[in-house]
Image: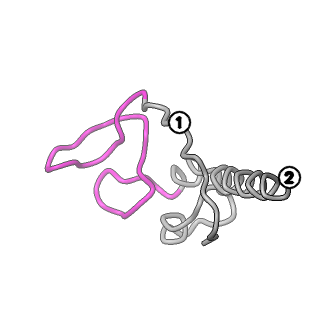
């Protein structure tokens, strides 16, 4: 919700396995979970909390809308770096 600046997209780190759940009518098992919805194969609340590094809520709907602290920190650092460039 900040405007007037842009951050370089971080490099994508490829997954080392499948995301567990249903895709196009077929179930896949894997070491990763998706933090959205509540359908078959979706992450449990405990799995979402662990995957996202969040320990202050155990409400599924809040977890599915949350921004993980590590990403919030990345955004904050990128924003502060952009302000330092403007000031220089």
Name the residue: 59% across, 61% down: 67
Q: Residues within 10 Å of mark 1 (few under 14, many from 20)?
A: few
Q: Which mark is residue 88?
A: 2
* Image x and y of residue 78, in percent: 70, 52
> Relative to the observer, which residue lies in front, 20 or 66?
66
Image x and y of residue 27, in percent: 21, 43
Residue 72 as seen in the image, left or right of residue 84: left
Residue 3's image quarter? bottom right
Q: Nearer the viewer, residue 17 or 10?
A: 10
SS assignment for the magenta stretch, majority: loop
The residues bearing labels 2 and 1 have C-alpha atoms spaced at a distance of 26 Å
Which quadrant of the figure contains the N terminus?
bottom right
Magenta segment: does it hold 53? no
Q: Which mark is residue 11?
A: 1
Magenta span has 36?
yes
Whether residue 23 sits left or right of residue 79 in the image: it is: left
Q: Residue at x 68, y 50 (%)?
A: 74
Q: Is residue 61 left or right of residue 49?
A: left
Q: Toward which corner of the image does residue 57 lie, by quadrant?
A: bottom right
Q: Residue at x 58, y 54 (%)?
A: 49
Q: Which residues are magenta?
A: 16-45
């Amino acid at each position: 919700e900040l405007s007037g600046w842009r951050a370089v997209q971080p490099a994508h780190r490829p997954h080392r396995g499948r995301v567990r759940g249903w895709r196009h009518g077929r179930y896949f098992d894997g070491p990763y979970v998706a933090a959205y919805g509540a359908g078959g194969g979706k992450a449990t609340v405990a799995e979402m909390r662990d995957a996202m590094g969040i320990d202050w809520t155990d409400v599924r709907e809040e977890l599915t809308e949350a921004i993980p602290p590590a990403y919030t920190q990345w955004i904050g650092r990128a924003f502060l770096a952009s302000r330092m460039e403007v000031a220089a």
